[in-house]
Image: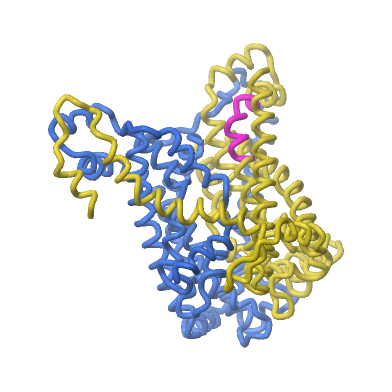
Amino acid sequence: MASFKPNPPNPKPDRQGRTGRRAKRLVGVGAKWVASAAITLVALFPVWWMVNIVFAPPGAALALSPRLVPTSWSAGVGHIVTVMTDGVFARAMANSFMFAGSQSLITLFIASLAAYCFAHLRFPGRAALFAFSLVGLMVPLGVIVLPTQRIVSGLGWLNSVQGLVIPLTASAFALFLLTEYMRAVPKELIEAATVDGVGKFGIYWRIALPLTRNGLLAVGILVCVMAWSNFLWPLVTVTKPGLYPVSVAAATYFNPQSKFTTGDMMAAALLSALPLIVVYGLLQRWIVDSISRAGLRG
Amino acid sequence: MTTKSAVKRPSRPGRALGPAWPAYLMLGPFLSVYLLFVVAPIVLTFVLSFTQWNGVTSPKFVGTDTFDAMLHSASVTKAFTNLIIYVVITVPLGMAVGLGLALFINRLSGRLGAFMRSAVFFPYIMPLFITALIWRWMLDPSFGIIDQILVALGGPALDWRQDPVFMMAGLIIVDIWHSAGFNMLLLLAGLKSIPAELYEAAKLDGAGVGREIWSVTLPQLRPVFFMVTANAFISAFQVFDLPWLLTESQASKGTGGPHQGLLFPVMEAVIRSTGGMRFGDAAVIGVLLLGLIALTTAVSFLIRRRWEDD
């Protein structure tokens, strides 16, 4: 994997030594750090605030003199226990792992298979089919969500795992990115394998897939995050609490008439965010690089 | 699996191009899911828009009656008015914030630059439903931290819950907090791909920072900028999670809160169909949204071609 080298457009000023210039530079450096700190604060504060409210002593979330640091470990644990034992949320976490996992595996398989065809096989209608497959990039689910729900309903798939997962696996976005990655597989390798008598599926499975590992991982993580985050689709296809994903389960904490406190609500949000925070914490550099590179291909 | 047969079937040596059928077979899984759950719903949207359908009995063809009813419905008009206001503010503002952040972070080097990139992108990783949960509490007029800060600074406490102007402002703030990092990341990648020689040439010509941004950076950034803008428009048209969850309460489920201040078309479509069993209504709203997407795409295509002619 090529490492990401920042490429500063402005090389260091070639004339140095004049005091005015040096002072100006110092001010510039100071401003740079102050601005960086302010931007970081805005970006991270809301998430910090969520943690802060979960671990606040009872009543403190409603206090008019907010504390900026978590002070009560036991209150936070209490909120988390409340949420995990409410009968829905723990199940919803497990459901979401299952939905996100299966959605990304199926997407990766069917989209990479199609991507390999578009990148390396020649057949009548290839360009037209590819363009046709990318129309989905311009039509987000929200716009067609109810007709899609009608089709799922017609199949008898409402309130089912397949109804939640399968319709979202034909991702034009995944197809597009994976086609770019597949194009990077050297033609010579594929020709050599063909000469050796390896079939088309064999070349895909044994040569193209292993060589696009990084792309598959990047797209897989993105699909996982999107599946985990999806709220609208489960909202219109699932009414059984036992099938709720974490998004719908967490949203039930909004109900002002529920017995749950703000601390409980924030604990639900925190627990839903935790897997993403952990993954991002571990892989942030790599995730950010992959998306940058993917974006440039658009 | 049927595709296994492709493994065993030896290709004739010396011929890179085999028959076409294995390709169609391998495209099959993706294309069938795509046809069933992306293409068919688009077609169905158009078909159902000329009907009224309760989802149970068979749809009744009503010509353009549903269109008439929707265009004269107060709540649909309100939803689209809100949408236009929202899109017209949040897309340019979001692009400006994203571009500003990208230009700033591009000037940082080494670890600080890498850290800022990750930190600013972080909100985008937060799902919208969590974003809504957090910000709804932060924007609470009685207990929210934002109003407490405003009051402490001597300002007024703003009513983010009841006043339609501040409801919309709050939504846009939350949306930009969430999406600025994504815009920044793609624009930053675009900035980094601009050849350094162009900047050196500009420097030799004696260009200052402003001049350099205007005549080197922005023109070079155009393709990426277009892609990010198109994406921003498309995701703004289908805005749902944030306004739905920011206004959801026992009394008003999905009606956009007081004065329908945060009512948007996808919300209206969901309420009319899953609540009111009026799928024809939802289809008309879908057609109108598809029309908006087509219009924006066409306009951006024209602008782009005109620029490229320059």
Picture residue at 56% right of the left edge, 79% below the top: A72
Residue A173's spot in the image, x, y percent? 47, 46
Q: Is residue A124 left or right of residue A86?
A: left
Q: Quadrant of residue B68?
A: bottom right
The relative height of residue B150 versus residue A221 in the rendered view (above or below) is below
Q: In which quarter of the image is residue A30?
A: top right
From where the camera sits, is residue B197 visible?
Answer: yes
- Colouring scheme applied when the structure was drawn: by chain
Residue B298's spot in the image, x, y percent? 66, 36
Q: In this view, does B301 lie to the left or right of B260?
A: left
Residue placed furthest toward the top: B205
Chain A colour is blue
Picture residue at 63% right of the left edge, 78% below the top: A262
Q: How many labels does the image show?
A: 0
- Queried whether the magenta region covers residue A199, the answer comes back as no
- Queried whether the magenta region covers residue B224, the answer comes back as yes
Residue B159's spot in the image, x, y percent? 82, 67
Q: Is residue A165 left or right of residue B85?
A: left
In front here: A11 or A185?
A185
Query: Which chain does the yellow colour mark?
Result: B
Residue B38's spot in the image, x, y percent? 50, 53
In front here: A270 or A95?
A95
Picture residue at 58% right of the left edge, 55% below the top: B123
The relative height of residue A148 versus residue B143 in the rendered view (above or below) is above
The relative height of residue B37 versus residue A246 in the rendered view (above or below) is above
Magenta residues, as a range?
A: B217-229
- Quarter holding the N terminus of chain A? top left
Picture residue at 69% right of the left edge, 74% below the top: B253
